[in-house]
Amino acid sequence: MKYIFGIDVGGTTIKMGLFDREGNLLDKWQIPTNTTQKGTHILPEIARSLQKKQKEHHISTEDILGAGVGVPGPVTADGVVNHCINLGWKKVSVVEELENLTGFSVEAANDANAAALGEIWQGSGKGFNSALLVTIGTGIGGGLVLNGKIHTGATGSGGEIGHICINPTETLPCTCGNYGCMEQYTSATGILRMAKQRLTETNAPSVLRQKNPLTAKDVLDGAKVGDELSVGVIDTMAEIMGRTLAICCAVVDVELMILGGGVSKAGTFLLEQVQKYFKKYAFHTQKDVKFRLAVLGNDAGIYGAARLMI
């Protein structure tokens, strides 16, 4: 039997999985992300953890096809990460360094792209050949798979849909330094910001006024029960996301849109809102693009990372 390691590097934890080449998850574990000294310990600690797990399962190096790695930053086709704030990295040759540390073959990709590949391989996108995964959390992540392969782009930034400018008159900066990015309106942070702004601007009654502290989930729950202010915020969020995804689809023409991340736990309610606006704005041949919720959850990254090696 041949084995593959899938690695999902996050700012707090590093999730890892041991797979067979058919995509069966045989073991999974995690270690803390050591970001001290500009993240120089991260790759050596990953290597040690993989080698420890290899010994536990009595696997010879010859039976390991390799290790795939997803990281939270732009990754070039040759496995170089250019500036990853969460890890303290500037320019790191992830593939070359991890291969030297482990003796395995290594492939690397952006974490959202890896998650998209995982969903297409063993998740809600199984049976599809092209998809755009949108992870809706504190920020907006995007992963793009075309013809069964991750599309990284020239700089490793392919799929960064959260930073499409949808409001050039915005005066508050996005975390990326630009203004008016989609992320500022459609992420959990954006939903909360819009809700607080509307609560300040109006005296209209709302269930949100009873929430302290207020969360994005509160706004989604309020919209589900028909709270007028909450409905307005989620309608704005869905309109912006649906319109932006329609624009993206006009460029890449994918078969499937997958919504994932913490906010997507709102389920079909949010999916249907976004899809409604997608249909309104999409090019006529693309109005029936499928929409699905991600199903692999936090494991999507390790599945996709493993798939990189196959």
Image (tube, rainbow, N blue to C red):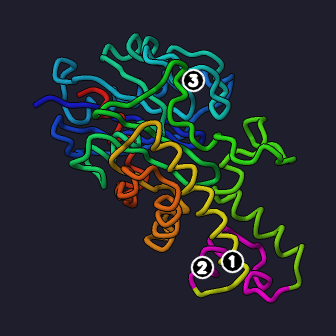
Q: Which of 310 and 134 is in front in this view?
A: 134
Please give the residue where the numbered disc 2 appears in the rendered image. Answer: 221
- Of tags 1 and 2, the one toward the viewer is 1
Q: Position of residue 39 (x, y in %)?
A: 62, 25
Q: Marks 1/2: CA distance?
A: 8 Å
Question: Which portion, as a residue range, is magenta?
Answer: 204-224
Please give the residue where the numbered disc 3 appears in the rendered image. Answer: 41
Q: Position of residue 190 (x, y in %)?
A: 71, 58
Q: Marks 2/3: CA distance?
A: 42 Å
Which residue type does callout 3 highlight?
A: His
137 relative to 143, above or below: below
Q: Which residue lies furthest to the front in this view?
A: 284
Determine the image quadrant of residue 105. top left
Q: Decide which of tag 2 and tag 3 comes sooner along the chain.
A: 3
Q: Is mark 3 on a helix, strand or loop?
A: loop
Contact (Cβ within 8 Å) of mark 1 with mark 2: yes
Q: What element carries label 1?
A: helix
Q: How crowded is mark 2: few (under 14 residues within 10 Å), some or many (20 or more)?
A: some
At 82% across and 43% down in the image, what residue appears? Answer: 173
Q: Decide which of tag 1 and tag 2 comes sooner along the chain.
A: 2
At 53% across and 60% down in the image, what residue appears? Answer: 262
84 relative to 95, above or below: below
Q: Position of residue 52 (x, y in %)?
A: 34, 30
Please give the residue where the numbered disc 1 appears in the rendered image. Answer: 230
